Amino acid sequence: MELVYKKNQLQTTIIYGETFASQIKSASFESKHLFLITNQRYYDLFSEKLIQFFDDKQELDWYICKNDAHCNNMSELESVLAFLADFDQQQDFLFLGVGNEGVVQLTNFLHETSVLNSDCWLLPLSIQSLSKSLIPEVQIELKNYPVLQRPVLAGRVIYDRTLTTDHGDRKLIDFLVFIRCGLVCSHDFLRMLFRNYSDANRLNQQSFNGMLDEMIRYYENNGETIDQFGRLFEQGFLETQNGHLLSGYMKRFLGCILQLLWSQEVNQFSFHYKNFIIWLIRLGFPVEFPEQILVSEYVEGILKCVERGEQAALLKEVGVLDQLQKPTTEDLLATIEQYKIILKEIRG
């Protein structure tokens, strides 16, 4: 499957349902220096396989990032620029980003801002990374906060299912992308997820390939909002003393479900939130709000972000956006309290 994806006067070609190898066969790279940027994990898993796709005479170099999803940071950018400084600046380059969401952003930013003459392809190796490839702006972070930003989409985004590793926690992380699509764009889509992925067994046994069309369409219409849903509530954990007890993905997950509950508390729309949380538990998501994180400190952390100008998308109802809004202290405290009550009721 190949389609043209357009967003904010930018466009990219998205290829999925085909292998990366088949794309390489139909392309010509003889005149280009290939520069592959990837994470250590994916280098260990796939470097030998990827090298076999290219001609032995092809000029090819690797840059290996940390496995952190936030490897699109100032330190990594400085290192990759220092690495590139030794190359012939007159060459034509193809930057190929292979890996997680940090890598696809770092690669795209490098392509867009470097003085080198380059094309950019992305090979995301997860649904989460694919979704980030569809956002028409890339960021470089400092201490987990964006400090540089450029509008850009890669020339090609190739999602090769045969190269992905989607079991265990990885499957849950990717499934959260589809949940966010449902929360922001379509209650019917969320119901479909509930019917088709009713528990952890069905989630682990079934592929997500049949939902890629809808996911891409949702991102074409509301990608930035989907991508940012839960972000403000996630950042609140970064401001707490014990926020490190949660992984980056757990911060985002809790941020999403708390932003949903905040929306329901403010707009009082009908939604079976408790059943929603029970379903997430059945899927294997850890829903507990850590006892080591004080609610007052967490709320204060969110308010610090609000003071810096951050806002959150308020839902009118599930699948229908209301507006961007700054949460108040009272609403935040009520939301966390209600969340803890719901968890207590579920536990019995």
Image: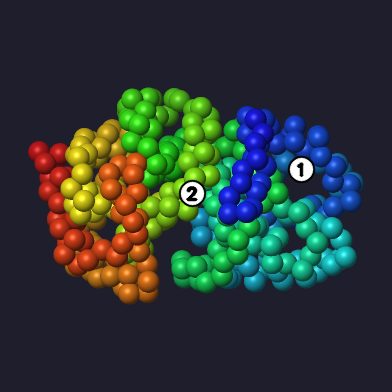
Front residue of this view, candidates 47 and 155:
155
The amino acid sitting under disc 1 is Ile
Q: According to the image, label 1 marks what residue?
A: 51
Q: Is residue 266 above or below residue 54?
A: below
Task: Tell me the SS state at disc 1.
Answer: helix
Q: Is residue 240 visible?
A: no
Name which quarter of the figure residue 151 lies in.
Answer: bottom right
Query: Few, some or many C-alpha atoms within 10 Å of disc 2 (few <14, some 14-19, many ≥20)?
Result: many
Above or below — where is 228 with respect to 174? below
Instruction: Indicate the quadrant containing the N terminus: top left, top right, bottom left or bottom right.
Output: top right
| Residue 177: image location, x then y, percent | 44, 43
Residue beneath the point at 78% across and 58% down:
118
Compared with 249, 201 (above or below) is above
Relative to residue 34, is residue 79 drawn left or right? left
Q: Position of residue 75 (x, y in %)?
A: 58, 70
Residue placed under numbered mark 2 in the picture: 223
Q: Nearer the viewer, residue 85 or 132?
A: 132
Q: Residue 163 appears in which quarter of the rendering?
A: top right
Residue name at image x 34 percent, y 41 percent: 319
Q: What residue sits 56% from the left and 70% below the top?
A: 148
